[in-house]
Each structure stands twice: as C-alpha cells, then as structure tokens.
Amino acid sequence: MRYIQEYCIAALIGTIVLAAMYFLKRNYATRNNRLFFAMILINLATSALNIVSIHTISYPERFSPFVRLSVNLVYLWLYNLLAAVFLLYVDSLTRIPRFKKPVRIYAYFVTALIAVLVLLSPMTHLIAWFDEALVYRRGVLHPLLYVTAYAAIFGALALFIASRKKFSRYQLLSVCSFILGNVVTQIFQLLYPRYVINNFICTLCLFFLFTAFENQAYYLYHTTMCYNSLAFVSTIRRDGRRKMPYRLTILQLGHLRDSAVMTSRSSASQFSTLLAGRLYKAFPGRVYALDDSTFAILEESRSRQWNPRIPARANACFQEPFTIVIRRHEESLLLSPQMLVMTVTEHFPTGYELLDFVRQPDSFSIPEIPDEAIDQTLEPLRRERKMLQLIDRALQERSFQVYYQPIMNLEAGRFRSAEALLCLNDPQEGFINPEELIRVAESYGRIEAIGLYVFEEVCRMIRDRKLLDQGIDYIEINLSPRQVRQPDLGDRLVSVMKRYGVSPSAINLEITETAEIMGGEKAQLIRFMNRMREEGVEFSLDDFGSGYATMNSLLQFPVSLVKYDKQILWRSMKDPSSMTIMQASMQGVRAVGKKVLVEGVETEEMEKRLREIGCDYLQGYLYSRPVPEEEFMRLIAQ
Ligand code: C2E
Ligand code: CA
Ligand code: CA
C-alpha cells in the first residue's frame, strides 16, 4: 500500500515549498494573501492527516477506534474548511460589495455547523461512527459534508465568473482549475479509492493560484484597487498589437496641491484611495492609477468621435463630498481634478511614451502645512460644500428665485427687455452671491437642473404676466456652456416653451465663451444654437471683452446681440483710449448687423457717454438692480 502514501508525501513536501515561497515574498499581508496562506496551512494539515489516516487504515490493530475515528472526522472537517476559505479567498479577490456579507455568513456559519456536527458525531452518529463490530459507518448527514463543500466551491466559481472581466485569462484558468481539479479528483477517488491523490492535485492547484495571483500584486497600485502604470503599459502594448484605437481620459490631481486641499501626504493618499474606489465602480477594470496624482481611464473604441459620456461619468464621481481625516478631524470636502480627454489613434510603440506624455513632469510632492494654517486652507472647501448643500436644498424645495433686471432701449427710450438672474435668499445664510452659486453648481453637475428651473420660471412669468402685452419684447436667460452637454437640451427647452405657450421670440439666450468650450464642445454649442435659431430663439454673447469672449467668439457664434462686459465700460470711463477702442469695436459689431448692449451702467455720466458713442441697449443699477417679479412689473408699468 506504500505507493498510496507517496502522493500524500509529495503533497506535503509541495505544500511546505509553497509556504516557504510565500514567506520569501515580503510585504504581502493583504486579505487575499492571508486567506491564501490559510489555504496552504489547511492543505498542509490535510496532507499530514491523510498520511496518518492511511496508516490507521493499513494497520488498524495499532490504533484505537477513537483515534481512527478522530483522524477521519478531522480530515473531513478540514476538507470542508478548505472549501470555505477558498470561497472567502475568491470573494476577497473579486470584491463585489453585494456578496461580501452573504459569503462571509455562509463561510463562517457552515464551517461552524460542520465542526459541531463532526464533534458530536461519535454520540449522534450523524456524520460517521464505528459500530460494535468496529466497522466504519457513514451517518445520515454524511452527504452534507460534500454538499456544503461543493456549494462553497461553486459559489466561488459563480463569484469569479461574475467578475471575470477584472482578471486575466491565466488567472481565470487558475481558479477554474482549482475547482475542476477538486471535482475531478473526488470522482476519481470514488472510482479508484486506492489512489489517494486529492491532496496532491490540490497542492498543484495552489501552486497555479499562487503564480496567477501573486503576480497580480505587481499590477495593482499599492493604495488602491486600480491597475498601476505597469498594467497600463502592458494594455497599451496589447492594444497596439491588435491595432485597437483607444480613448484616454486623464484625471490630474496635481493642481490640488496648490489649491490647499492636500494639507498632508496622508490626506492626499486618503483622497486618492477614495477616488480610486469611486472611479473603479464607475469604470470597472478600466481605471489605472499612474501615480499618486494621475488616473487614466482607458477605453478601447473603434469610434474616433469624442464621447461626452466618459468625462461626464468621471465627473459624477466628484459630486459627493470626500470624507477625509485631517489631523484627527473628519472633513468632508468637495474636490475636483483637471480632466483631459484624448482619443489616441496613433500608437505609442511601447506605452512608456504615452505614460511620459500624460504624466506631469513634476511629481506630486506635498508640503506639510502647519496646524494653524489648516483651518485657513480648508475654509474655501468647507464653503463650497455648504454651497452645494444650499443648492441641493433649494432645488428640492424649489426655493430659487428669479430676479429681473430691466434693459433700457435707447431708441425707444424705455425698457423693452430684461435679463433673468438667479437669486437665492437662504433663511440662515442670507443672500447668496449668484456668481459663486453658479460656479459651484457648474462644478458639481447641478447647473443643468438650475438652468431648466430658471428657464421654466421665466416661461411661467411671461405667460402669467402676459408680458408681451406689457411692452416687453423678450427676456434674456443665461445659459451655461455645461448645459449644452445635455444632448436633448434643445428638445427640453422647446417643450417647456410649448407647455407654457411662450413664443420662442420672447426668449433670448445669453452664452459666454469660457476656457471650457473646446473642440467637440464648441461644435456642439454651435449646432445647438442653430437649431434654436430655427425655432426662433435669438442669442446674445455675454461678457464680451472679458476673458475668452473676444472677436474670435463673435465670428464663430451666430448671435444677434453683443453684451459688453461692465469692466470694459468702467475702464473706459477712466481711460480715454479704452473708450476709443470700445467705440470702434461697437461700430464694427453694429456694421455686421448685430445689436450692442453695455452692462454696468451706474451713473448718468456713463449713460451720456454711451449715448454719444452709439449703443442700442443699456443695463445697470442706474435704471434698476435685478428685482423680484412683482417689483419688475411695477417698474415697467411706470
Ligand atoms: P452676468 O450674466 O454678467 O449678469 C450681470 C450681473 O451684473 C448681475 O450680477 C447683475 O446684478 C450685475 N449688474 C448689473 N448691472 C450692474 C451695475 O450697474 N453694477 C454692478 N456692479 N453690477 C451690475 P449677478 O446677479 O450677481 O449675477 C452674476 C452672474 O451669475 C451673472 O453674470 C451670470 O454669469 C451668473 N448667473 C446669474 N443667473 C444665472 C442663471 O440663471 N444661469 C446662469 N447660467 N448663470 C447665471
Ligand atoms: Ca448675463
Ligand atoms: Ca454679463
């Protein structure tokens, strides 16, 4: 019978080698690895017990029935335990949040139950016992051992199949072979009980798992579940071989260093870990942490078109605050990165060039900020969070108000239009600055809802107040470029106008050119504008002369009115050459058939000068501040 034991001895030696290899690899104490080590230990114990058990069977006279029974029962229990730990191991590899609890309950509960049943078996005879003639007998619940072990093993298989996309083919193969190996040897064992090979096969499978998953550590970024730059480079290489174009969205957190978010290395790494978790959820298996401050979302795609869904989904990861412990205090902060989207169709030969290209040259070194400065640095972030709370509440309770600022038509000598401006008067915080409000709303994806709210409010007001009969031709509504990212914005606006029976000519939309509108977005904005103009809605170019809104925008966007920024007027009042330039530019704008409006008219003197140089409309505190609906109606009735 000796050759039977040899498989067990080989298994024992193999497992010892495996354990040694495990220990030779350092820094290696993740949950996966601890569970894997538990499997090694269990396999070690079962191999040893198997040898003893074969011995007891071969020489029954040397062992008491009690020892023989115990060896057998413990062996059975360990086999069950191995299945349960394997289930936990696969759960820990796959990390599907939904399954975490049921898996643990099952594994712990079943192992405990089997342990109790096995322990009581000599009394209860439920699992196995020796009868009076000292014959080994199986109890009624004996099959339960197999049922539970296989339930765990196949449960693990199901978990793995559910998240197969996260793993390489080799890894898939290693897990499947573990499962298959165990099933096949069980069957083999039933057919040929003389060949005790199950521990041996199990050891081989563990080796396989070890090589498949131990390496995974090399491909994972140390603080996150994301792949690292090594994985990134190898994916790029694979895509290059397959001639697969890909699209990259890069999130750069480097600038947060200056914006006072990262008060310490620890808060920075907490943030990047939290962020990685969110990104991973949004883009399973496609997020790469290139370094502490750079994440890449890689998307293989045959289409060369710019796809707004990816940055939008990435953006959505920043819409809830991040709770970070800073010097023992929990702070929940709103943070957002710089985002760069690029479609890469040219292949970078090795991927390393691409990596150099997307990484910022300066690494993410964070200065430690002294305690007393922390409050100061966190203040703007707390304020942003507060602002977002106010916005969300106002949206929920529909407590935003729309104020109207009348616009003087110089030719008619009276108000014939007005600008709708958002206003929020919070019971606790008082009057909120619209500029700040809009900025926060834009950063955290609330501007779409606010924009629609204002649009609807204005339409309701035009209908309720029969505004066109009151001598007002149209209302100007501010449109944020972000709103235009919604592909169905045009349809929505048209349907609101229809619902309120408002003529499109009673609406004028104000657009501002900002740094944000680039490439694909600009084309989208122009398409939207043309579509709305076909409906009869006109456009104005807001804040002309400030920032990005310059001659260039005037040439590109089909607007009928140009609104000069108040800063231009104010500077011109002090500086004659600015006035000359403004005048000349206005003449040019009017020569191509567009109307001209100047904002920020605060004094009679300003009005006088502007009349002289020839404007169509004036807007400013001289005539009125933005006022609530009732007051506006009183104003125009005068
Ligand atoms: P804007 O579109 O340039 O709006 C004109 C701003 O100038 C208003 O500020 C208005 O109160 C102010 N203003 C008008 N005349 C004078 C004046 O004579 N002197 C001075 N000092 N200021 C004057 P407000 O209401 O604080 O709005 C600020 C910005 O917030 C707006 O600038 C606009 O960019 C944004 N905003 C306001 N409401 C909305 C909205 O419904 N949607 C969007 N997307 N943005 C809005
Ligand atoms: Ca405006
Ligand atoms: Ca403006």
Image: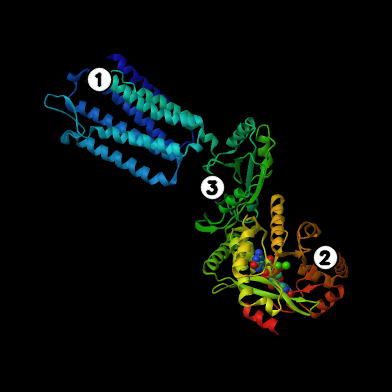
Position in image of residue 347 (x %, y %): 68, 34
C-alpha distance separating marks 2 and 1: 104 Å
- In magenta, the rendered stretch is 270-282
Q: Earlier in the sequence, mark 2 or mark 1?
A: 1
The one nearer the camera, 493 or 617, is 493
Q: Which numbered circle lies on residue 593?
A: 2
Near mark 1 (Cα within 10 A), the count class, few <14, some 14-19 or many ≥20, is some
Res 363 seen here: yes
Mark 2, other Cα within 10 Å: few <14 / some 14–19 / many ≥20: few
Q: Position of residue 200 (x, y in %)?
A: 36, 22
The three-letter code of the residue at mark 1 reads His
Q: Is residue 591 above or below residue 9?
A: below
- Ligand 2 shows up in the quarter that is bottom right
Question: Marks 3 and 2, Cα distance to the nearest angstrom?
Answer: 48 Å
The type of residue carrying mark 2 is Gly
Disc 3, disc 2: CB below 8 Å? Answer: no
Question: Are there few (<14), some (14-19), or many (20+) residues within 10 Å of tag 3?
Answer: some
Residue at the left extreme of this rendering: 132
Q: Is residue 592 left or right of residue 124?
A: right
Q: Give the main secondary structure of the magenta stretch.
A: helix
Q: Is residue 137 magenta?
A: no
| Element type at mark 1 | helix
Write down the quadrant of residue 342 in the picture. top right
Q: Which residue is mark 3?
A: 282
Q: Dot 1 corresponds to which residue?
A: 55
Q: Is residue 271 magenta?
A: yes
Q: Secondary structure at mark 3?
A: helix
Left or right of 545 on screen, residue 200: left
Q: Is residue 435 visible?
A: no
